[in-house]
Image: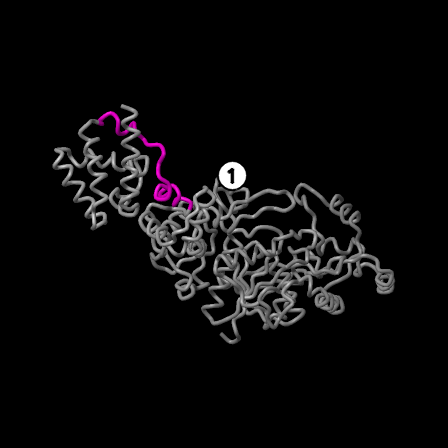
Amino acid sequence: MEKKVRVRFAPSPTGGLHLGGVRTVLYNYLFAKQHQGDFILRIEDTDQSRFVEGAEAYIFETLKWCGLEPDESTLHGGNYGPYRQSERKDSYKKYAIQLVEQGQAYYAFDTPEELDAMRTRLRTEENPSPQYDHTVRMQMRNSLTISDSETKILLSEQTPFVIRIKMPVGETVRFNDMIRGEVSFDTSTVDDKVLLKADGMPTYHLAVVADDYQMKISHAFRGEEWLPSAPVHILLWKYLFGLDAMPQWAHLPLIMGPHGKLSKRDGSKYGFPVFAMNWKDPKTGEQTEGFRERGFTTEAFVNLLAMLGWNDGTEKELFSLDELVQSFSIDKVHKSGAKFDFEKAKWFNHEWIKTLPVTAYAKQVKSLFAEKGIVLENDEYLEEVLSLVKDRCTLLADFYEHSYFFFKAPREWDLSAVSPKWNEAKATFFTSFSKTLLSINDWNAAALENLFKQLAEQAAIKPGELQLPLRIMLVGGKFGPTVFEIAQLLGKEETSERITAALYALAQEQ
């Protein structure tokens, strides 16, 4: 690369971070780390009307959970700050004024009422949403249609105005997209976007160009929904800084839901998360579930995001973050939208639960148990339990269902599965087995199974007739891992006590 790689993610603090946003972060991060570059987080809060309290902190917490923390940001500092656009307000107006002086932008003094009247007057079936473009600009109240002296008077009287780009007519604007190849636009089809608003704040169009220039951004990866704005941005680069200074662009494919672009509504409608973490809207109180709270590991979440629109050209699907840094290539990102499949997402999580050491998620599992009223204090015992049952778990929440009985002795048993074939001989067997357990020195699953079979043979009972009753005595129902592995972890006293308690319950039922 000719210059140092510097990429940025520039979210608006308007709510929770959607899957698509986190994937954009991930691709930026991977590209930067692969090229020993910098990943910058810039807060684009120029639209103060959409600002949501807590959203900025949520963004940082999300990236921290994902392991995708920036090198430069409002939190991390850096040499190109401020990293919040509202704190850079004074730097934008000079560029807008420069464009006006160069004849590439103009002051527009139209009131909201005049704009509404224009849209009403020009609205047709073929054109239901008229734009402020080259066909309209000369009919409006702006510095193109009024004299210089009148413009100066309006400005001196502090008449509200915006500055709009003057889009050229009949030109073709081209750029080379790192994913899509050459992309071209007819400037006649693009409206005169507002660059500077009446409150003195820039719109996204001006701010993104100015900030990318000042922060020396080398590559800009963003969603394909920004493609229609590309000709405006290209012209701003050309007019202000020269096209040689412009970053290389890559427009990422959309993430598709069951019906069109994936949205927050899809999550509530179809029962899967679309945000990285839980988000509660402070204005409405509406809670949106996140992948973290649903029970996804960081590794699985990052892995599944990477595969939504990219692969390395092989059959490999499981990638750690370090492996992604090594393997990622922007030119292997797909052009077409990637379909989000929640069942596939769960598959990734299941595989990572099996692959990771249980210490990677033991803390989260402890929190889940605490929510159910079970406080886990013995970390070593917990890790043994998790290791035994992890192959059965798809989500971290599944650990409760598959292991709560290791921490809480059953008080009820599925006796209906035992009673029909229960008899005195079996009762005698389990009474003897329970007492014998207390004298065993070699306490492990294999030794327990051998003892169990020996005693069954002495009692002339098939071991297969006794294993289900033993399982129900230990866990309460017909579930769980291998019964002798359960007993091994429970220990001799606990195993004996559970058998005795279940025998009492069975005696009461006879």
Q: Quadrant of residue 74?
A: bottom right
Q: Residue at x 87, y 60 (%)?
A: 157
Tell which residue pokes out farthest to the bottom in this image: 2
| Residue 398 is inside the magenta segment | yes
Q: Is residue 455 left or right of 37 when viewed as pictured?
A: left
Q: Nearer the viewer, residue 233 or 10?
A: 10
Percent position of residue 345, x then y: 42, 48
Determine whether 183 is above or below 349 in the image. Answer: below
| Residue 265 is inside the magenta segment | no
* Amino acid on which disc 1 is placed: Lys
Mark 1 element type:
helix
Determine whether 502 is above or below 340 in the image. Answer: above
Q: Quadrant of residue 314?
A: bottom left
Percent position of residue 327, x then y: 40, 64
Percent position of residue 141, x then y: 81, 55
Q: Is residue 210 left or right of 464 when viewed as pictured?
A: right
Tell which residue pokes out farthest to the top in this image: 510
Label 1 belongs to which residue?
269
Residues in magenta, as a range: 397-422
Q: Residue at x 52, y 42 (%)?
A: 266
Q: Nearer the viewer, residue 214 or 63?
A: 63
